[in-house]
Image (cartoon, rainbow, N blue to C red):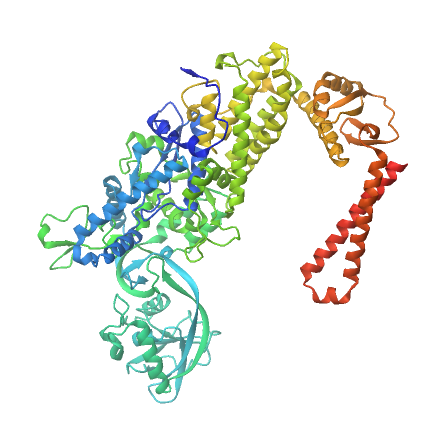
Amino acid sequence: MEEHNQVSLPPKYDPTAVEKDRYKFWIDGKYFEAKADKTKKPFTIVIPPPNVTGKLHIGHAWDTTLQDIITRMKRMQGYDVLYLPGMDHAGIATQSKVEAKLREQGLSRYDLGREKFLEKAWEWKDEYATFIRKQWENLGLGLDYSRERFTLDEGLSEAVKEVFIKLYDKGLIYRGEYIINWDPATKTALSDIEVIHEEIQGHFYHMRYPLKDGTGSIEIATTRPETMLGDTAVAVHPDDDRYKELIGKKVVLPIVGREIEIVADDYVDMEFGSGAVKITPAHDPNDFEIGNRHNLERVLVMNEDGTMNDRAGICKGMDRFECRKQLVKDLQDEGILFKIEEHMHSVGHSERSGAVVEPYLSTQWFVNMQPLADAAVDLQEKDDDKKVHFVPDRFENTYLRWMENTRDWCISRQLWWGHRIPAWYHKETGEIHVGKQAPKDEENWQQDSDVLDTWFSSALWPFSTLNWPDTQDEEFKHFFPTNVLVTGYDIIGFWVSRMIFQSIEFNDERPFKDVLIHGLVRDAEGRKMSKSLGNGVDPMEVVEKYGADSLRYFLATGSTPGQDLRFQWEKVESTWNFVNKIWNASRFVIMNLDELKYDEIDLSGEKSVADKWILTRLNETIDQVNKNVNKYEFGEAGRHLYNFIWDEFCDWYIEMAKLPLYGEDEQAKATTRSVLAYVLDYTMRMLHPFMPFVTEEIWQHLPHQGESITEAAWPEVRTDLHDVQASEEMKRLVAIIRSVRNIRAEVDTPMSKQVQLLIQAKDDQISLQFEQNRHYLERFCNTSELIISTSIKAPEKAMSAVITGADLFLPLEGLIDVDKEVTRLKNELEKLNKEVDRVQKKLANDGFVKKAPESVVEEEKQKEKDYREKRSKVEARIKELQS
């Protein structure tokens, strides 16, 4: 295989230049294409398909970065990796956008008709799919575009029909009247996830419904007076003594004049309000269930657009909220409405149109959820190799709660953009035919005009994208079930659970082994990002400013699994500083390799303690990164990498490597070059899943085999390069050098000034180790004289430090002018005395303590503590110098 070794990196790290054209190099090289190679173990992640409604947000960037880290690492570990891209047609969201665009031209979808409107929707999809692919490119996602899917493509559409028909044939899909979430603005049913609940200041309207026999009235309260026009009963609890005599009697519905019965039902809460409730089966989900139990009529008083219909009597033609105002006035005039009470309550709004959602009686298609949910719950009681593993595991409870409390799922939507329901109605008899095509006498049948809920097709995503229902397809057999799903905790119920029960139903197994759950990206203050707050972050803006590698590393390491992430620009900047540090260190290494070839890297020769230490630390870092990535603890893996690269490789090993590199010993030079090349190569490989662009660029300049780091083997621990004793020796050397630097800082002695250093070793072995590494101590402590012994008499006036295995002494004579230092310290002491005195007087002032904010008083107390501690240290130092 061809070998590469370029001589140097540009002097300055420029993410734009580094990332430019690199993605094209990967795509052209087909490095991300899965091979369906049966000799390799498969590893599959399907991307949670973004909606083709707009551009990716920072949450998408986080989600996909985690997926990309996992897949890049697995690819390097020799797996046949499939990271499958795709997008969701997002029914109501996309249709709303396309209709809004048409309104700007003075058109509606009805002006165009269904076919022409769908052409416009496909144009929208093509435009925004291009945007999304460009953003995937900017983030560096290793996606296999040869297998890209779309929820409305031909194959997935066939899968959707197959599932619908099979569930219908099993009696798990049915058509019926139910109360659903209705958006009067877009005139369609909504799923629960498409409803945003907001706390709104509303009112409780208290009314007295008169008894038909004229003996009195019964008190009820409602937040929606307009629905009273559809009341068909009043309900009380069967055990409520106040109303036992009234059960079975009739009341006269005000305004309407219709007689309705008082019924007894356990649902009613005796303690809430008057203990009596109005029942409107066509406009409230709980009332609907009560109505079913008591065979009540369902009186629908509203049109699909939120206006009142013929059965609304005097309010016919009015908007629902205008009707409310009119009824409140009329009921007050009649003395029926006797109290209006302010009331904060949760009101559902359409996520797309913003309209207040109406609980509405409608004929829709439903999935019978109970059998499917039971099977999904049962799966979690099976062995580990059968069940779905949630990470963190607490989210399994979230999933089970949703499954155990699920209701039948309304899957029909009154839209044109989506999978049209494969059901036909006979024009004369009304007979229903469910199938992929209409019956043979097609002219007598009309297809249902509704489409399926977007979640219906995305629930099939892990297997429909892999050519299901052809279960004999080689790729399906190789890549399914998938390995990991990465997603946010906010859609466990709406998406994760649906993928699981559909996979169990149609494949008799889990769709993925693990579900890695992350939180939401919040702003720096912890607030949820939203258009109204204007606190959203465009990931492409971050990439433009700091590069994809900085954004990815921040996103991957900024939170633990399941937790929210606060976006902070300064943290992204500090990550950029880290990349810059890597760049500069790599540039130094590459410039000093002296055209070293890959097959010339030799670690078998005599190595210095620094060589042995850095190779041992590399082994330990590989081990820690492996352990943490396997647990999806990317933050911890990143911390180990950061500490190894910045603190140990850059700040210590590279500095120590300069001694042999700039020395005369050719063998030592050769070994040092080999260690530098080997450690930097392995470090870039470990860092590659986090920072793909910069690591590829650096790796291309290192001696290596192969065309791309994406295919380089993942680093493995080499026991032959593990030396615990050398590691301990190095720790002692580093401790000595740090202690000397700290003492210099304490007494304000620059590194350029030579100092005398006395080291008393604990035993002969440690003393010998120090002697063997004297050159490091002399160079990095900058000594005028270095004495190493097991028996040193401590100088009278000296700075000292204790490390494991040795005591250090730096005679003051060589460090400072004692008289000058005492004078300086006395001046410092005088200033500190004044500060202590000033703060104590302030705190002794009752007026200040009582009137000032608590935080200000606390701040002054902290100042007093700090000044007194500093004063004690200065007094001790003066005493030490004068003794």
* Camera-side residue of 401 and 732: 732
The answer to whether 800 is drawn above or below residue 410 in the figure is above
In percent of the image, x 35 and y 69: which residue is there?
287
In percent of the image, x 59 and y 20: which residue is there?
719
The answer to whether 409 is drawn above or below residue 812 in the figure is below
* Residue 868: x %, y % from top left: 79, 50
* Camera-side residue of 455 and 736: 736
- Classify residue 752 by image quadrant: top right
Q: Is residue 714 left or right of residue 257?
A: right
Q: Is residue 473 left or right of residue 58?
A: left
Q: Residue furthest right?
A: 883
The answer to whether 194 is drawn above or below residue 259 in the figure is above
In percent of the image, x 51 and y 23: which residue is there?
681
Q: Quadrant of the C terminus?
A: top right
- Classify residue 386 by image quadrant: top left
* Residue 180: x %, y % from top left: 32, 61
- Any part of residue 843 in sight: yes
Numbered disc total = 0
* Camera-side residue of 78 and 4: 4
* Residue 875: x %, y % from top left: 84, 44
* Residue 461: x %, y % from top left: 33, 42
In percent of the image, x 24 and y 52: which residue is there?
451
Q: Quadrant of the N terminus?
A: top left
- Any part of residue 231 in sight: no
